[in-house]
Image: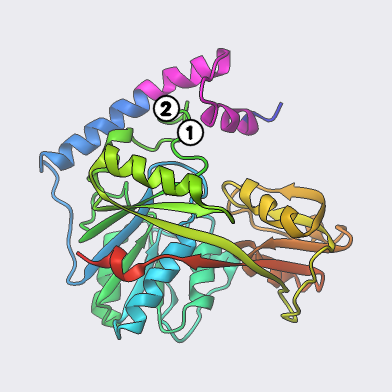
Amino acid sequence: MNIKTEITKIHYDENPKGLLYCVLKFGSLFYSLGSRLKNLLYDKEFIIPKKVDGFVVSVGNLTTGGVGKTPVVAELAKYYLSQGEKVAIVSRGYGGKLNNKHVNLISDGINLYYNAEQAGDEPYWFAVNLNLCAVLTCADRYKACRFAVNNLGVTKIILDDGFQHRKFHRDLDIVLVDSEKQFGNWDELPAGPLREGISNIKRADKIVVVSKNTEHSKAESFVKELITFTSKEVLLCKIEPEYIYNIISGEHLEKGAEITALSAIGQPEQFYKFLETDYTVKDKIAFDDHHQYNLDEIKNISGIIVTTEKDAVKLSLLGLNNIFALKLKTDIDSEKLLKI
């Protein structure tokens, strides 16, 4: 039995039962107590968040796993860049080998200073795909943001996965929710996927329902439910497949091909569904989120390998010519989302 797989099943079971769930539920009591105490200290202003001289937007979520933050953060950065702003994305740098106790400048918007293994997959992807946007990593987001403002002249900062990082002030708090997974079984960690109690979603300024699908009626209904539940502005973000391309040559893959799906992301199920729509998936290989690949793991996989763009930045270091990536298109009203 793979314990991680079993726990994930519990997280998204509407009526979980069994000994393992009872043990996890007991653990959730302590987790919830700590989370509530932390939030109370901030809500009652016993602890005051630190500020920097720049406009800070946090993009986060209430649950563990992949919700779709990376493409949303990228779209918001592109919008600010189009408005002539000096933009920085600040991430914790999870999965990278750099010491994140220090401020790591992955890119100043022009120069790239680290590779994907060092920086982590998401920061590196931002740095490669967003021209003129600075990318920094540090566990202390305040320290990184202060560096961005003082040393790079940044005017707009986007915190990647910042909703629970309350020690740092943000001017706009955006929370993302997956339209399919939603809030799982509504339990807090470790019995459920919630990082904090569901009521804390009302702390957000705006909410985005992310629909990684080709049909969005379920997501549209969920938007209406969240508006009623939270009394907040709720927007819909549509993420759909566009094409598949070779990560070395850029060649597009024709539909109908036989492929192996490879990923190391939080929730790969929708990635597989996208591929199965137009391709024959002969095998699915999933590693843990943010996994750092090595050549021995990949070189014996025969035929065409299709992965995510986030994984592709790491796999490109291996120099194999049979690896393709799924290009996604993101449809969101960035101007409306960022309007105060």
Quarter of the N terminus within the rendering? top right
Distance from the alpha carbon under mark 2 to that under mark 1:
8 Å
Q: Is residue 281 visible?
A: yes
Q: Quadrant of residue 39?
A: top left
Q: Where is residue 54 shown, x and y percent of the image?
A: 20, 72
Q: Quadrant of residue 237?
A: bottom left
- Whether label 2 touches label 1, CB < 8 Å: yes
Check residue 25 for magenta coloring: yes
Image check: 17 left or right of 85? right
Q: Which residues are magenta?
A: 4-29
Which residue is at the front of the view, 86 or 75? 75
Question: Which residue occupies 38% across, 42% down?
Answer: 62
Quarter of the C terminus within the rendering? bottom left
Main SS class of the magenta portion in the image: helix
Amino acid on which disc 2 is placed? Asp
Task: Identify the element where label 2 is drawn.
Answer: loop
Residue behind mark 1? 184
Question: Which residue occupies 50% across, 81% down?
Answer: 112
Residue behind mark 2? 187
Q: Quadrant of residue 47?
A: top left
Question: Which residue occupies 42% across, 59% down?
Answer: 100
Image check: 230 left or right of 223? left
Q: Which mark is residue 289?
A: none
Crowd around label 1: few <14 · some 14–19 · many ≥20 (10 Å): many
Image check: 333 left or right of 279? left
Task: Identify the element where label 1 is drawn.
Answer: loop
Establish if 338 lies above or below 267: below
Q: Is residue 143 visible?
A: no
Q: Where is residue 264 shown, x and y percent of the image?
A: 64, 52
Establish if 311 lies above or below 273: below
Amino acid on which disc 1 is placed? Gly
